[in-house]
């Protein structure tokens, strides 16, 4: 394995067939640019994790957070959807604040708005408990981009996680096309090309922009609220930055059939708000623990 000094899990990138090493090299180089810059004046940042029965990997996430470089200690908040395992205890032991909200009140948009409400600082990084940061410079990248008052948010395409299936690793081959250094995003046509825009498992959000735009639209109960937020931000003249360095390792361990179902669901969510159907969610996401 090559010496990727700024990467936390280069071995996961190298599971991507054909392009994995190139992706790791480009990510490490871009992270190195942030490491070499003067970040001492970056504002405080909140790191909010949405969780539900995250299992053993959650401990790895909490360990990885301590490896993230930033001039000040980030505020760590765990927004927990009534976990029945040890997720809240792991979070508290790691020094995080835990906010519990009822399972029956869950929707994707509502959970994001709760996350933004709980954060103390104007710059907020949002993720989920089954993801892992890819680089030690993740927060520096997010804080740097969000320091621009014209920026509503920053995001990246995700990288394979520890549970990545073969189909998810193969699908990540195309990530090499998104390894350009930080740059503004644009609305794409046709609509399907906006899949992956501002996916909320790894996004930095400006609290001021979130408030100006009226938050995440809670009519989008079943997903798509994150892309909708980004498109509304762009329409309002704000910037959405794509930056590979804020990328998280995030996959669901889905086989070919459920992976196809998930993509079909994502495409449908782009067409407009939909109510959350828990039975359909359980069917296409066997990785989720609803106990």
Image (tube, helix red, strand yellow):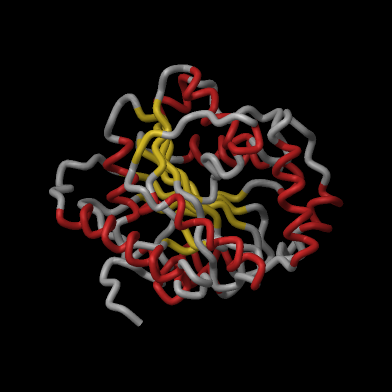
Q: Which residue is most to the right?
A: 279
Image quadrant occupied by the C terminus = bottom right
Horizontal side of residue 169 vs 124, given as left or right: right
Percent position (x, y) of residue 251? 60, 62
Horizontal side of residue 39 vs 3, given as left or right: left
Give the residue at x 47% y 30%.
186
Give the residue at x 26% y 60%.
29
Q: Which of 161 and 91 is in front in this view?
A: 161
Percent position (x, y) of residue 262? 73, 53
Horizontal side of residue 138 vs 260, given as left or right: left
Image quadrant occupied by the N terminus = bottom left
Give the residue at x 30% y 48%.
141
Percent position (x, y) of residue 192? 66, 37
* Residue 55, quarter of the rendered image: bottom right
Picture mark count: 0
* Residue 170, quarter of the rendered image: bottom right
Horizontal side of residue 47 vs 78, given as left or right: left
Please say if 232 is above or below 120: above
Please say if 72 is above or below 286: above
Give the residue at x 52% y 40%.
198
Percent position (x, y) of residue 13? 45, 69
Q: Which of 254 and 97 is in front in this view?
A: 254
Q: Nearer the viewer, residue 64 or 253?
A: 253
Please say if 201 is above or below 231: below
Q: Which residue is most to the top?
A: 236
């Amino acid at each position: 394995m090559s010496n990727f000094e700024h990467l936390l899990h280069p071995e996961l990138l190298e599971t991507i067939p054909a392009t994995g090493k190139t992706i790791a090299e480009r990510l490490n180089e871009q992270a190195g640019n942030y490491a070499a810059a003067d970040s001492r004046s970056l504002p405080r940042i909140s790191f909010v994790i949405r969780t539900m029965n995250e299992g053993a990997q959650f401990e790895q996430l909490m360990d990885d957070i301590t490896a993230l470089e930033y001039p000040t200690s980030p505020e760590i908040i765990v927004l927990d959807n009534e976990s029945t395992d040890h997720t809240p205890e792991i979070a508290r032991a790691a020094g995080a604040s835990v906010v519990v909200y009822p399972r029956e009140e869950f929707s994707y948009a509502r959970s994001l708005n709760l996350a933004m409400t709980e954060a103390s600082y104007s710059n907020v990084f949002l993720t989920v408990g089954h993801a892992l940061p890819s680089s030690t410079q993740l927060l520096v990248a997010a804080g740097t981009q969000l320091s621009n008052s014209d920026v509503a948010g920053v995001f990246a395409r995700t990288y394979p996680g520890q549970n990545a299936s073969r189909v998810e690793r193969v699908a990540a081959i195309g990530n090499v096309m998104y390894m350009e250094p930080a740059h503004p995003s644009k609305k794409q046509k046709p609509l399907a090309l906006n899949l992956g825009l501002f996916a909320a498992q790894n996004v930095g959000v400006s609290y001021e922009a979130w408030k100006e735009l009226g938050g995440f639209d809670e009519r989008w109960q079943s997903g798509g609220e994150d892309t909708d937020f980004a498109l509304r931000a762009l329409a309002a003249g704000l910037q959405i930055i794509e930056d590979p360095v804020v990328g998280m390792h995030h996959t669901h361990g889905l086989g070919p059939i459920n992976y196809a179902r998930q993509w079909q669901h994502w495409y449908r969510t782009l067409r407009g708000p939909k109510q959350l159907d828990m039975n359909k969610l359980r069917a296409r996401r066997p990785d989720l623990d609803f106990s």
